[in-house]
Amino acid sequence: MSEVPKPSSARTIPIVEQPPSASASRAWALPLPQPTSAVQRPFPPLDTHSRPLRDLRISVTDRCNFRCGYCMPRSAFGNDHPFLPYAELLSFEEITRAANVLLPLGVRKLRLTGGEPLLRKDLERLVAQLSALRTLDGTPPELTLTTNGTLLKRKAAALKAAGLQRVTVSLDALDNATFQRMSDTGLHVHEVLEGIEAAQAVGLGPIKVNMVVQKGVNDDQILPMVRHFKGSGIELRFIEFMDVGQTNGWQMQHVLPSDEVRARIHAEHPLLPAPPHQAGETAQRWSHADGQGHVGFISSVTQAFCGDCNRLRLSTDGRLYTCLFATQGHDLRSHLRATPAASDEDISARLAALWSQRQDRYSEQRSQSPTGSTLGRTDHAPRIEMSYIGG
């Protein structure tokens, strides 16, 4: 990797657990569906488009130390924003139970997200609990984490020791001024780079780095990012600016299509198509023609990839979302906290029913609609924020 100048003095980030809030609980979710005999055929269940459940994304906190405009803009997530009271968050034991019930339904991969997941105190304890679980075929689940990287230097070794397998780091620029402007923070980009180096040193890999590209904002950082990570063993992935949530001011004019990003890279670093690692991957992979690694492109706006989507998302407070662009979640927390206790068998049957009834294909529907300022979006229901359920 190429060198990036270090700051004269690195700033540290306190990990703060706020006390429970006295604010009223948020409006709750849809109930989990009642199980039916149909969900037993086939088993593990397939959704209405014959997609299996393979990937569970677990948001462990709705808080973040960044205020990226495309995710948690400060205008909507300022100092007075009512984050979830601590008592409403799923405990580590509740998260582990939820994962353990979902694994027999076909889940093979568990990804910890946020907000910024490393702000959750003692996260390595949750990692240790999840790493002890087993999938339907008796093997440990793939256990990964997505982070902005600023706390990774101090946490990498403990996370690896607890059983975390790899990390994905969000980084939108190498130029520090651009990085600070996009993340709306006074932190230095070198803190993220040092976190990546620490993760690589302890074996949390293969590491992926995600860059959200916005036209006229950070697209001048595409080639510097490629030059920096090429040949490092780290896969750089470029994400189109997506219309997720209600607060990021999304407009099509700010989207730089993946085809254009790839053309810029190819002109300096020739690329060849590469096969995906596994079915359901969101990124199209390309290899550097000189053998110096791979880059990926996540093109939710210009190239719909709903066809083999196999992801389920669990929010910090126990709602299940079957699509990143969902407007409502389903209440799992009440079943985890029921008195008398709900059985794992009952919860499993309800979750199988939920997946069997899943119809989501938002990106495909959007791309098939008449072209407009929002690619034909005609529904105006409030969408869940990405910071609430992870990317």
Image: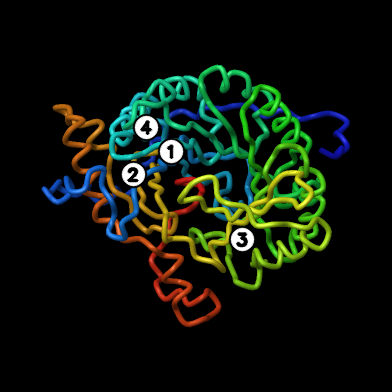
Q: Amino acid at mark 1?
A: Ile
Q: Quadrant of residue 4?
A: top right
Question: Pointer 4: what residue?
Answer: 90
Query: Measured along the vertical axis of the image, is residue 334 above or below residue 287?
Result: above
Query: Measured along the vertical axis of the image, is residue 265 above or below residue 251?
Result: above
Q: Which mark is residue 319?
A: 2
Disc on the earlier residue, 4 or 1: 1
Disc on the earlier residue, 2 or 3: 3
Q: Amino acid at mark 3?
A: Glu
Q: Gap between marks 2 and 3, in whole Å? A: 26 Å
Q: Amino acid at mark 2?
A: Arg
Outermost residue on the left side: it is 37
Q: Nearer the viewer, mark 4 or mark 1?
A: 1
Question: Pointer 1: what residue?
Answer: 58
Question: Pointer 3: what residue?
Answer: 240
Q: Secondary structure at mark 3?
A: strand
Q: Quadrant of residue 328?
A: bottom left
Q: Amino acid at mark 4?
A: Leu
Disc on the earlier residue, 1 or 2: 1
Q: Nearer the viewer, mark 4 or mark 3?
A: 3
